[in-house]
Amino acid sequence: MARAAKNGNGNGRKFNTQQSLDGYIKSACDIMRRSNCAGALQYVPELTWILFLRILDEQEQQEAEHAEAVGASFTYSLQPPYRWHDWAAPYSEDLLTLRDGLTQGWKRKELQDGKINGFIDFVNGDLLPHLKKLREQPNAKPRQKVISEILSGTERTRIDTERNLLDILDKVHEISSQVIDDTHIYTLSQVYEGLLLKMGEKGNDGGQFFTPRVVVRAMVQAINPTIGETVYDAGCGTGGFLAQAYEHMAGKNNANITSAEDLEILKQKTFYGREKDNAIYPIALANLILHGIDAPQIWHGNTLTGGETYGGLFTTAPALYDVALMNPPFGGKEGKEAQTNFPYKTSSTQVLFLQHVLNSLKPKGRCGIVLDEGILFRTNETAFVQTKKKLLDDADVWCIVSLPGGVFTTAGAGVKTNLVFFTKGKSTQQIWYYDLSDLKVAKKSPLTLEHFEDFFQRLPAREESDRSWTVTIEEIEAKNYDLKAVNPNAKSTEDLRTPDELLDVIETKGKEVTQALAILRGSK
């Protein structure tokens, strides 16, 4: 088998900085924006499957070369003409780009030399249907099932012309791990997260699927999952919690991975999630693969009703998990079908997810979950109170962090949120609160990890401070399970003056104004 060209793309391009690669990806997005993909919610899914097929092709070529070097056999997930090397890569007669005797881009050249629009007809009428049906073939491999699922929501390319599609493929072809500076450990995944961030910006509907990365990183750090533990997100969106958990567990430069067994466990048997949205589910799979998770075990369907769209990647999932991380949708409402699966019935999506997560943890399992303020303080609906009582009875809620308003601006104006952490197994005796609600957060002054530094310093000993305090279970019960963070150490901004005192102030100020006006008139 002939090896591929050393630089992976044949043109000598090298990305030495994060900015250079970000800019290059942006140039591909610019083509998409003028090609019937006006917003990020349109062009990110399109770029997802294209970028995934490019990275898959390179990864399998490297695996094939390694197998050949040790005398082992290797079977590609895709056969000609459906490999990137065949239909998407620019045509090249360079012998170094030969693969199984086939020149790079041979199918692309054949299509371009044929009938008008033959290339785009092949993509829509042959390539995409073939990839989507891979999971249905006998003895389909896990990777083939992932390919089908990433393409599951793609009926046809959104790109409006063949020329624009070819230009995008040319740009994506130049992206290769071999042309990215080795100092950027997760460069491709970081670039992809940048694209997902575009989906989460204000004005894009994708915000409901995207949790700000600073919140994700803080929650993962607080829960601290380790290799050997299973990690679960019951509504994983774009996969941010699972991807960040992978990076945390692997450690910087994979320092925590000390054996081949550790690596296999982390890549194959650790991360599990559920997502119902047809457009977001493939993005989650691609995001996890780009982060290095070889077997993303994501169930496609409605977590709360149990309605399954596809469960072929979830067949080895355990019944219970060591760690749960999630951000349930704010303000979601569920019907009777979902409510029948839970003991405390309510239309509140967040309350039902809280019940689901509590039931999904092993004894001593840990959870970090984002909940809006209303879930914590509402005591006028029976299911809310029952769920919180069940949580405190069955788990130790050891910390609640009150976040500033504006952190989740893309999820809806005015949403005030909290981070709730608990360990299943023993009942709550007291809760340690930490207050960040006084911070002013905006686009140009976002919440950062630096804002959590004091929190992480005080968390191990549950130290009290101007921002932190402890509330006992007796106090919580007396308030009918109102869990809202009310900082007793916060400086009061309430005006305590009496009405008579305020009238005296107004009268004094009035006299001062009258005197000042008299002086001004006298000076004319």
Image: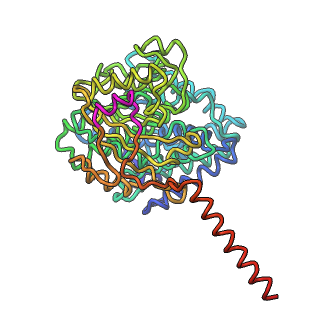
Q: Would residue 60 be seen by someone viewing this image from the given angle?
A: no
For the record, the magenta segment spans 472-484
Based on the picture, tell me whether residue 302 belongs to the magenta stretch: no
Between residue 60 and residue 187, name the one nearer to us.
187
Assign the C terminus to one quadrant of the image: bottom right
Depth order, front residue of 502/217:
502
Residue that lies at the very extreme toward the left in this rendered image: 259
Pick out the residue farthest to the right.
Answer: 524
Residue 275 is situated, as x and y percent measured from the top left of the image, at: 47, 27
Q: Nearer the viewer, residue 231 or 309?
A: 231
Q: Is residue 504 left or right of residue 441?
A: right
Q: Quadrant of the N terminus?
A: top left
Q: Position of residue 462 (x, y in %)?
A: 24, 46
Residue that lies at the very extreme toward the bottom in this rendered image: 523
Residue occupying image coordinates x 55% and y 16%? 335
Image position of 507 (left or right of 145): right
Work out whether 311 lies above or below 127: above
